[in-house]
Image: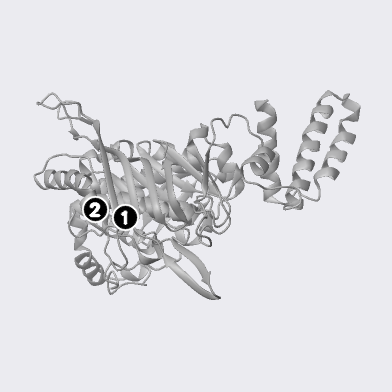
Amino acid sequence: MRIESLRLENFRGHVDTVFEFHSNFNLVVGENGAGKTSLLEAVTIAIGSWLLGFPGHDSRNIRERDVRRVFDVVERRYRELPQYPVRVSAQGYVHVAKASRNESTGEVEYEALSNGKKNPRELPVEWERSIETAGGKTTRRGAADIKRYASIFSDSVLQREPRILPLIRYFGAGRLWESVRDTEGKALSKHKGKQPADLLEDADEIDMALREYDKLSEPFYGYRMSVDKRCNPDDLLRWMAVEYLTELDEDEYSPALRLVYKAIELFLPEIQSARYVKRLGSLVLNFKSGQRQPFSDLSDGYRNIVAIVADLAIKASMLNPQLGEKALDMTPGVVLIDELDLHLHPRWQRRVVEDLRRTFPKVQFICTTHSPFLIQTLRDGSELIVLDSPGDSNTDVDSESPSIQVLDKLDNLGIETISRGIMGVDAEASPQYMAMLEAAKEYLAELDEAAKAPEDRLEEYKRQLSKRIAPFADNPAFQAVLEAERIYKIGK
């Protein structure tokens, strides 16, 4: 499944706006208030329509706060006028594929279909969700086609056909810190809030946890909480604890748990291995440097990324167990991440996009960011969507939706060009940043001169260079600026 285009009518700040998406990666940038999160919420409504074909898994409906309001004053009387109808319309493709393990070769591969149809293939689909009038409910009739496809997939899986299910997921900006509750508002289990170590104190407690997590055997468990923007690391660790105990009970490794390890290791090339450790009741990362850290001791940046990767790997393995070790490579889907750069050091921001592409090659990502370093790593201008805020788009009857820029080319854009030309940052708005930028440029220029200097003058050059960057040397942002300028210079 992937989204080709999205049209928003009277949705939050949008009067009538059309977005077009890249099939692989999309990075949405814009000032605060430009509508980045609103766009992700709208896409969640669109991709959540897939869940209409899977009873027991809630889709994301249009809510009252999604209705665009016009602010009006008549004879000093202030009014908020809700605008209807509110519509979210989408065009996209459903990925149709069957795959299983070849008994002769032992490899997981796409099956040859007897009816002569191509496998895999994509089928175009259009659908719409709307609220037509005040007090109305989100309609489903416009989503009949995508629901029909989803129902076919659901029935196929229940008939034991090796149909590949698409992964869908939305991670909000507060994903690690908001407690996760099910759709009825009840705690996921009476062990809610306990640390995994508490659950591992004795076997009786584990047995209780296993009984309460009997949903793990459901064929569509991977769609649980898919359109809920929160992500609870405790639940992820608890899932690992259950899978680890299953390995011990059956004296056989869990393919799903091993796939999660593989995803983390693939995403983080600096680690040697990722393993769940019973004694600690936690996931432990073993770094190639020799360092060993449990999940709880990781920085916010690491915890954020590991939680996202583990969550997606768990869903891929639970939705498509027939893919075994190839579930990461062969599972399609749509994943939304608000503020992808959240808690990430600038050096890591320069690689996170490629890390996601490499780990989940068939997934379409739609992410927001405020970081120019992420923009630098895009492969093509069509992967970047720039939202220009019109001010307060709800305050005037004649106001327009936030405008959209789609850039054609990003080749060798320097950090200064991105900050000024794309993100609207000028020297007056960020004097410290501009000072660091100038220092980086001068440092690199003098470094070139030092390389040409006679050997007896090298020490003097080194002293001068150290003096020039001393005010910024301990600033991580300066190191990132320096790296960005260095790469830009090489590219030129």
For residue 226, the mark is: 1
- Residue 343: x and y, percent? 55, 55
Quarter of the figure with the C terminus:
top right
Residue visible at 22% across and 71% down in the picture? 204
Is residue 79 found left or right of 361 in the rendered image? right
Could you tell me if residue 332 is visible in this image?
A: no
38 up-or-down from 330: above or below = below
Q: Secondary structure at mark 1?
A: loop
Inter-mark Cα distance, 2 to 1: 9 Å
Q: Vertical placement of 481 versus 431: above or below? A: above
Relative vertical location of residue 84 with respect to residue 363 in this rendering, above or below: below
Q: Report which residue position mark 2 lands on.
A: 51
Please state which amino acid type lies under the numbered disc 2: Leu
**Mark drawn on residue 276:** none
Q: Quadrant of the N terminus?
A: top left
Q: Is residue 71 visible?
A: yes
Q: Secondary structure at mark 2?
A: helix
Q: Quadrant of residue 277?
A: bottom left
Are there few (<14), some (14-19), or many (20+) residues within 10 Å of tag 1?
many
Can you tell which of label 2 and label 1 is closer to the viewer?
Answer: 2
Q: Give how far across and how far down residue 156 sits, in percent.
A: 12, 43
Amino acid type, label 1: Ser
Q: Say if 193 sits above or below 169 in the image.
A: below
For this view, does 474 lie left or right of residue 47?
Answer: right
- Residue visible at 20% across and 40% down? 322
